[in-house]
Amino acid sequence: MNVSFSPEHQAFRDEVRRFLDRALDSELREAQARCPGIFLDYDFNIRWHRILHKQGWVAPAWPRQYGGTGWDLTQRYLWTRETTLAGAPSLAPMGLGMCGPMLIGCGSQGQKDYYLPRILSGEDYWCQGYSEPASGSDLASLKLQARQEGEHLVLNGSKIWTTHAHVANRMFCLVRSDDTGKPQQGITFLLLDMASPGISVEPIVFASGTHEVNQVFFDDVRVPVTNVVGELNQGWQVAKYLLEFERGGGGTAAQQSALDRVRKLAAGVTTDSGTLLEDPDYKSRLDRTEIELQAVQYTELRIMAALSKGQNPGPESSIMKNLGANLSQRITELALEAVGDYITPDQPWQPGNNAQPLGPAGGSTALPRYFNLRASSIAGGSNEVQKNIVAKLVLGL
Ligand SMILES: Cc1cc2nc3c(=O)[nH]c(=O)nc-3n(C[C@H](O)[C@H](O)[C@H](O)COP(=O)(O)OP(=O)(O)OC[C@H]3O[C@@H](n4cnc5c(N)ncnc54)[C@H](O)[C@@H]3O)c2cc1C
């Protein structure tokens, strides 16, 4: 497989590197380096978002006519890889990666005109209201009730595990507007304002102590029917369309960065016979992980090559989601093992905290990351559910 990039793409990569050198300040780099989980805090997220918006590079995957960059697939791949390896903040995907593409594909002209510029500028920050206390993998069983009263839908019920609902001013969600047919029928896709009367957000704090997700309660919340995307009771098609974006794109650069950090950590830990990096058992597990990561990276490149020839990604996104989640978790286990004794005391991992961490530099996030990355094989469709998709669509079982 030839993985060299054309001179034009190499020039593009150099331009991206120069931009990152200029635009990424130490505070943003530190915030990302100390990020304990999957999502970076809103304040840093939105600061980087606005810098990219000013540059015109905030939505590389959107068509140019809606504010995208017009980059080809290789440029987008290089952009993701270079920003991640440079330690740039990762942007929240709910607006740019999910709601925006969904509106471009399924929204009315009025919805596109109103919401897309606000997603690009960062004025609107979205959360995703799909899961409910008794509906996760089996999403079509959702029950949040939407009763039509004239020009409004009146919502009662609850959404759960809603990432960043405590900072979002908008939610896209699925509601039950008819419960007489099959579970997939009678679901409506809705956009709503989080400041609507009757919405309350309760935090769910992870075992690590970080706050990313929430439970959201709806008590007679009135939403105009003009906020329905597509047709009333036909939201399942829209939801499925959006999930393709949620599960697409492997992004092995994040795992590469995390593994590089583990190598540095291990090099700073002394053992009886040198550093942990020289310990044969630890080193062999680190190397095995690196080899698996490279294999996934080649798969990612193969998918990109197929996409650039106009082929459909298909169930490969489920394979990538699964492999990526497993690798991310394995890397947090190696980090935790490297930091070892120093993880028990409370460590100052928050950005801006100037207390000196115990143990090797960069090790203070090992414990919260270990806990928080357990979620990567659940969020966005669990590993088992992805395997079911592969069994059905690839193996024909
Ligand atoms: C950190 C985090 C962030 C999240 N953010 C959001 C968000 O922003 N918005 C949102 O709507 N949701 C969010 N979720 C919810 C997420 O989508 C669900 O947790 C996920 O879909 C699984 O659903 P569940 O938790 O109800 O588990 P369940 O569906 O109850 O699954 C429990 C277990 O059973 C297994 N299982 C279920 N069905 C099958 C099957 N058919 N075959 C084999 N095994 C099966 C699952 O793999 C899992 O191990 C988030 C979750 C996490 C952990």
Image: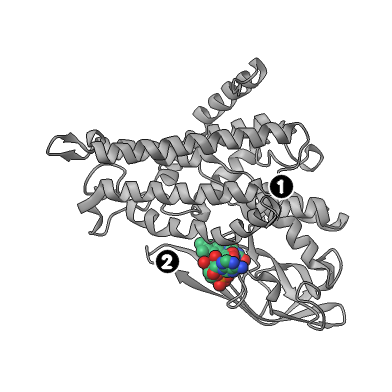
Name the residue nearer the viewer: 76 or 59: 76
**CB contact under 8 Å: marks 1 and 2:** no
User: Within 8 Å: ligand 1 and the Cβ of disc 1?
Assistant: no
Q: Residue at x 28, y 55 (%)?
A: 347
Residue 173 in percent (x, y) is at 70, 68
Residue that lies at the very extreme toward the top in this rendered image: 7
Q: Amino acid at mark 2?
A: Phe
Quadrant position of residue 285: top left
Residue 225 lies left or right of residue 5; in this view the side is right
Residue 253 in percent (x, y) is at 51, 37
- Residue corresponding to mark 1: 314
User: Within 8 Å: ligand 1 and the Cβ of disc 2?
Assistant: yes
Q: Amino acid at mark 1?
A: Gly
Residue 292 lies left or right of residue 307; in this view the side is left
The earlier-in-sequence mark between 1 and 2 is: 2
Residue at disc 2, secondary structure: loop
Viewer can see residue 365: no
Please state, as top left, top right, bottom left or bottom right, where the N terminus lies in the image: top right
Q: Marks 1/2: CA distance?
A: 33 Å
Viewer can see residue 315: yes
